[in-house]
Amino acid sequence: MSFSKQVVRGVQSTMVARVVDIVANAVLMVILARFLLTPEEYGLLYVAISVVGIAGLFGTLGLPSSTARYVTEYGEAKGGQIPHILRKTAIYMIALGLVVTITLILTREWVANIVSEPGLEPLLVAGALYVLFQSFHKYLTSVFQGFNQISLSALLNAVSAVGRLIFAVILATIGFGAVGALLGYAIGFVLATVVGVWYIIRDFVPKYTPDEQMESGLTRRILEYSVPLTATRSATVLDKKVDTILVGAIAGAASASYYTIAKQVTDACIAPASSLGYTISPAFGEDKVGDRLEKAAELYEKSLEHVLVLYIPGAVGLFLVAEPMVLQVFGPAYEGAVPVVQIISAFVFANAVTRITSDGLDFLGRARERAIIKMTTAVANFFLNLLLIPQYGAVGAALATVVTHSIYAGTNVYIISRELPITFASIARTGVGIVVVSAGMAIVVLQLVPFVSGVISLLGVVMAGIICWAILSTVSGLFDVRQLVVFLQ
């Protein structure tokens, strides 16, 4: 299969999985927030998920991404090393996961007191199972990415999403509340892990005949490369999780629910960028090894242009429909989330740029530089949260996220431009043009927003904005479906 067809197939697979994930998350979010949990319970659930997410750092470190990098590197020329790589790293992953799981159970009371949320303690017991199998899930999806089997990574993500939706709703409905919802999340990861292990045993174990012994120094190199990846992953998780914990601890569980809803809405918006970035990242490493830097640069330039075309108007549209969306979908109890969604809409664009850039840096061997920048911005985000949350609550956390993540996204683009011969003239022209298109779309949406009276009319306004964007983008030549198809062929 040609590389371009692999990209198309990978994007399609991850997009399908992301759509499944988005739909499952959206349905689960609405059911839990509007029908099964109070704002305080919903906020407490996601404070718990943030806490166990941080604990999960130590259950994976940087091993999944480091494993993926070396699976890619050894997959063609030295396939006999692949079984050794998988066996060694799997042992490390199991050991890390068990240690973190047991530690979380033993320290649950202490952690709940630190966060000033006594109600967290039973959630953290359920969270121990979440941590263990989320670690295995992360490892397996990374391994499949390293094999360039993006469709299998997508399958695991889809299984996890569907399992999460089904079991979280069932367990919360029958009376287990937030604890049941968190157990549902964990069960989703359990199901995905079972499917992933089955594919490894069926398709990949028989494919590679192991060499007599592992290459000297290979284990050390895998572990050494995992160090900067650990730093980057740590900073990423802290960046995503600490703010929710701080909002809950400082401003209360209800404010944490407002912030959580805003982050979930923006996360749902970046599906296309996530799919594209996840698919093209291994190609950067392959092109560097094959001395095809111009090809990698062209792929990145086109990807960035399409991100501009999609996400600048997307951020504008989200800002404009934030109020009716929150009130109609989640109900008046979540009115406090409106300004949070409006501010964090800018995060949509910055996050989309990051999604098509950051993973590629790891495959280009620039994990150390990315780790330094990520740690720096994560620390800055932490202190900005401490400064802004006491006065502005969830709005302050949103401001901190937008500022620090924008800096991180810009720095990622700079680093990749030092590695690949990227030309920014065409990208800049596209950016200017889409700002004009976004302004035209905004005028139309602003005229229609006052007429929103329910979910149906809200969807009508959103569709009107999308149609306006599509017409203006096509007429101006900024978005050409045929050109995109030709590029990928």
Image (tube, grey):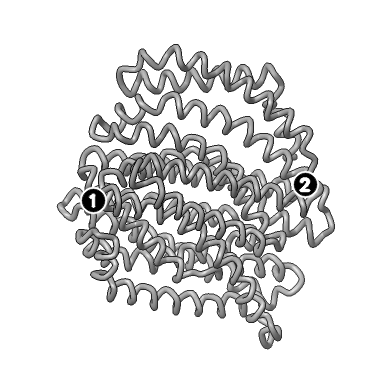
Asked if the residue at tag 1 contacts the one at tag 2, i.e. Cβ–Cβ closer than 8 Å, the answer is no
Q: Nearer the viewer, residue 75 or 61?
A: 61
According to the picture, the residue beneath numbered tag 2 turns out to be 297
Q: Secondary structure at mark 1?
A: helix
Disc 1 packing (10 Å; few <14; some 14–19; many ≥20) = some
Q: Nearer the viewer, residue 472 or 237?
A: 237
Identify which amino acid the numbered label 1 is placed on: Ile
- In the rendered view, tell whether residue 236 sits above or below residue 10: below
Disc 2 packing (10 Å; few <14; some 14–19; many ≥20) = many
What residue is rendered at 67% in x and 26% in y?
A: 479
Q: Is residue 162 left or right of residue 123?
A: right
- In the rendered view, tell whether residue 459 sits above or below residue 65: above
Between discs 2 and 1, the one toward the N terminus: 1
What residue is rendered at 44% in x and 79% in y?
A: 95
**Relative image position of residue 444 (x, y in whole percent):** 50, 14
What residue is rendered at 43% in x and 46% in y?
A: 21
**Relative image position of residue 367 (x, y in whole percent):** 65, 62
Picture quadrant of residue 229: bottom right
According to the picture, the residue beneath numbered tag 1 turns out to be 170
Marks 2 and 1 sit apart, C-alpha to C-alpha, by: 48 Å
Identify which amino acid the numbered label 2 is placed on: Ala
- In the rendered view, tell whether residue 467 sits above or below residue 395: above
What residue is rendered at 72% in x and 44% in y?
A: 300
Q: Nearer the viewer, residue 2 or 355?
A: 355
**Relative image position of residue 118 (x, y in whole percent):** 20, 61
Q: Secondary structure at mark 2?
A: helix
**Relative image position of residue 83 (x, y in whole percent):** 61, 77
How many labels, in total? 2
Q: Quadrant of the C terminus?
A: top right
